[in-house]
Image: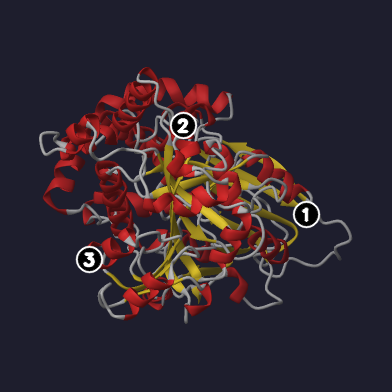
Amino acid sequence: MANFGPMRDRFLHLLRDNLQLFGVRGRFLDYGAGLATTSRFLLDHCAMSSGLAYDPAFAEEEARHAASGALGPGLSLSDQLATLDEPADLAILFDVIEHVPDPAQVLHEIHGCVRHDGWLALTVPYNAHEWGDDDEFYGHLRRMSRQGIVTLLERNGWNVIRVLDPTFPTFWLARRSYLLLRRLRGTSFGLEPEIAGSDLERSLRSPRHVAWNPAGLFPRLLAADLVPWDLVRRFDLYFESVFRGFELFVVCQKRDGGEPACEVCALGVCSFHRFFDRYSLQKCGYCGSERVLPEHATAQHPSAEEKTYPRSMEGLVTALRRRRARHVTACRPPENSLLDVASGSGAMLKVLQEQGWRVTGTASSEALAARVRADAACVVVGEMAELPGDAAYGVVTLFNVIEHVADLRRALEQLDRLVLPGGTLILEYPNGNSLLKKMLGWRWFGYDPPHHRLQINPIVLADSLGLRNFRLVRETHFSLEYSFLCFAQSLANLLMPFQRDSFYRWLCGRAGGRLGGLWAVLSVVLFALAVPLFLAFQPLASVLRRGCVVRQVFKKTDFGAPRTKNRASPPER
């Protein structure tokens, strides 16, 4: 049914929409191009500049036709993949996986033809229960399950970003009806002489013949202008995640290296879990931690510490940040020194510096660092790895930072170096085991894509630090700054499904125009109504250790450490 005009148009429109969603443009490789219909569509409707239509079944006559320029500017046609002179930004693999004897080899071959972080869009028949006479007609070698296709892609160097089934229910019903009519009429695809031959021969011919007889009454009625296919496409949008049809549309991004090991536990493999908004959730099959893909450059999305709050809120935010100093001074460290990673405005640094502590902060830009240096605090621009090699502190704090780091395993190694023996490490971050997250799914505010890369299982993170001789001494599941905000904004996301995090976006100066401001105002009303619910929910979440925000306090063991005098402690009277 892939050669049925309305269904082909459905997939081409879906391809265009997803390329626009992810900002994909440039050069493409259409692998197994057939009659190059998709290649022409990419050039005419998808802002692609040039491409190669490759198919090993191209005849010499077609190659001469391409050489004459009849295919149009920017498009070349070949039966040799070696003619691709530079890596492509996008590879297209429409209805190929089911025809080739070794799909893994094809995916590996395409992987080598696509640039770093390049893209792959493919369609493939799936769902073995949908096997029919048309599979024999086209020489399909297989129908895999949805999970089997995802696994195949991930094992061959591709991160699966989006999986959709555009065939259910409309085209599924049309196909089922057509196959039933043929059986009732006693017509079998497999008995027709024009499709005789081996599976491979039928596969090579599949783009050039169609199981849907264009002269038949049923196909002519379906393809007629009387059928409002634009409305049908809009209707089918609501069923794209039902996965009861017969063909998948998948968007992938190239991954360099081996299988995507979980950054939190280092034991499991992260696999496609679900898609929301424009992001994919990759979930670890071992510890349940999640990461968000695709990852975007920080230049496109400001870091968490670069949020600009309304003037009316700055006083409250500063007061909450200064309050953190009380938690630091209660740690009784071996040395009154502090490293605050991503210190923001530096409110906590200022308080502790006034109390005689040696304080250092980090900032992502010189502009942020200048704000903190105005209070005479020491600020390093850059990541933790850029701190001096001999630097170590009695207390190291990461408030809502660990979920942002680019490499969690490396960050934990750096923290081991930065905390003095007997010192304290304080981590606060969204709880990947949150009860509200379990209840609301992707509507949970704590995802905050693309800023939060990771959703961390706090139990597994504590185990990882424990193996580095960090003992968990205290864990709380309430944050005065974020717990209620996370709870209320999550409920607003549930009750107002046409927006996401509108109040928080307004709070951070990212309201998104008048409509975003309107959603933010409506969110304030819901926030007020959510107060009694929060007062009932938070004690339960704290008892179950399933709050929206978790704060963990670790003590680094002083095993084998020399006893030294506290250099920064106040002088004795």
- Residue identified by numbered label 3: 44
Could you give the CA–CA distance between mark 2 and mark 1, rounded to whole angstroms? 60 Å
Placement of 199 over or under 57, stated as above or below: above
Residue type marked 1? Arg
Q: Are marks 3 and 2 in contact (CB under 8 Å)?
A: no
Q: Residue at x 20, y 53 (%)?
A: 512
Can you give x and y, in whole percent of width and height, for residue 420 in the image?
A: 73, 63
Can you give x and y, in whole percent of width and height, for residue 216 in the image?
A: 24, 33
Q: Residue at x 22, y 38 (%)?
A: 215
Q: Residues within 10 Å of mark 3 (few under 14, many from 20)?
A: few
- Residue identified by numbered label 2: 133
- Residue identified by numbered label 1: 468
Secondary element at image label 1: loop
Residue type marked 2? Asp
Q: Residue at x 53, y 39 (%)?
A: 431
Q: Earlier in the sequence, mark 3 or mark 1?
A: 3
